[in-house]
Amino acid sequence: MPCRLGHAVLLLIASASCAAAFHAVPAKIGVQTRGTFLRSLHASMRPETDGPSLASRREALSTAAKVLLGVAGGAVLPLRQAHAASGADIWTAPLHNRYFLVRAGEQTWESEGSELISHPVYKLHMEKCGLSDAGYNHAYSAAETLSTLGFGATTEPWVWTSIHVAATQTAQAISSHHKISHHHVVPEFSFLDARGFGCYEGTPVAEARAAVWREDVKDQDYRMPPNEDGTPNESLRDVQVRVRQALQIMETQYQDLDIAIVAPDAETLSTLHCSLEGQPLVNAHSFHFSPGEVRLLDYRTRVETPNLAVSEDFGKLQLTGVQHNVMRVSNHLHINGPESFLNPQP
């Protein structure tokens, strides 16, 4: 009896699932395939005169399942996929939305110019990672810059923000300024985290960044040694993988919308911008973001951009605006090293 009862429950669950899924079978695969599906389903539920045959019912259910999976009779059912969901060409294919990259305002530990903090355990620590006085000004300035860039001019925009406290505070300033409803502010729990600096956690900021950037410009897969406290030691490619995940989710869920992406550090956003420009990741620091900086990226219609690798023909290229600045910074970085950015001359 327990066996019969369990089998009956299994059949009820399977039949309910199959009946609901039947409407998803495209009509273009033909009447014959739909008929095979129904016959298999009915056969699985029909009582046997000589007692139930478990083997025959298993075979019938198996046939119905194969039809649903699109393999019965050699038919292949098309799967419904969102644009760019595969991730294979998300960096080069036209995107659905306009993206506004926003670096959070200056954090308290940054204003003190002391030791680097990149461990995820501190991202909710208000005293260390909350906005400094200058950081609040950066956040309000970012909100105003978004207005000048037409953020949400035609429809209510969205804000995707890291749950890092500085990013959250910046996102709050943006949502308040633009009167964005709370359900249009989406917290992101890990994909937009600050880059983990491994063994450089707790070391002077300028020294840590100089040491890591020096290796980044040579190898996009460079990982700094790990730290005993568990601080992630991430390469530029590691960061690229998780920002790709975040972008894929947005591209799958939204279309023709304005989305502000708020991250707590420059590394996450510069890697995203570099990737969308189709540039090698060793050039990621050429796309460096200052606290509170905002950039509009509209890739709904792709435009070919020049490669930003160092070239003797740099002076011959006719570039304007952001492209020219990115090219100039890229060459400066390769020639003079990252220390020149960390210790600017008066």
Image (spheres, helix red, strand yellow):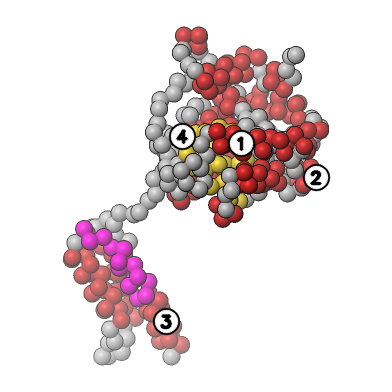
Q: Amino acid at mark 4?
A: Asp
Does the magenta run of residues contain 24? yes
Whether 279 is drawn above or below 89: the answer is: above
Distance between the Cα atoms at labels 2 and 3?
56 Å
Whether 214 is drawn above or below 166: the answer is: above
Viewed as shown, does residue 20 lie left or right of 344? left
**Which of the 4 quarters of the picture holds residue 18?**
bottom left
The residue under the point 18% across, 65% down is 31
Q: Nearer the viewer, residue 194 or 112?
A: 112
Q: Residues within 10 Å of mark 3 (few under 14, many from 20)?
A: few
Q: Are marks 2 and 3 in contact (CB under 8 Å)?
A: no
Q: Secondary structure at mark 2?
A: helix
Q: Secondary structure at mark 4?
A: strand
Q: Which residue is labeled 3 in the image?
A: 9
The magenta-colored residue range is 15-28
Q: Nearer the viewer, mark 4 or mark 1?
A: 1
Does the magenta run of residues contain 32? no
Distance between the Cα atoms at labels 1 and 3?
60 Å
Residue 60 screen position, x and y as percent: 29, 74
Residue 162 screen position, x and y as percent: 63, 46
Q: Which residue is labeled 1 in the image?
A: 144
Distance between the Cα atoms at labels 2 and 4?
36 Å
Q: Which mark is residue 298?
A: 4
Whether 76 is drawn above or below 300: the answer is: below
Q: Which residue is labeled 2 in the image?
A: 127
User: Quick one: label 2 or label 4, which is nearer the N terminus?
Assistant: 2
Q: Where's the C terminus, which quadrant?
A: top right
Q: Amino acid at mark 3?
A: Val
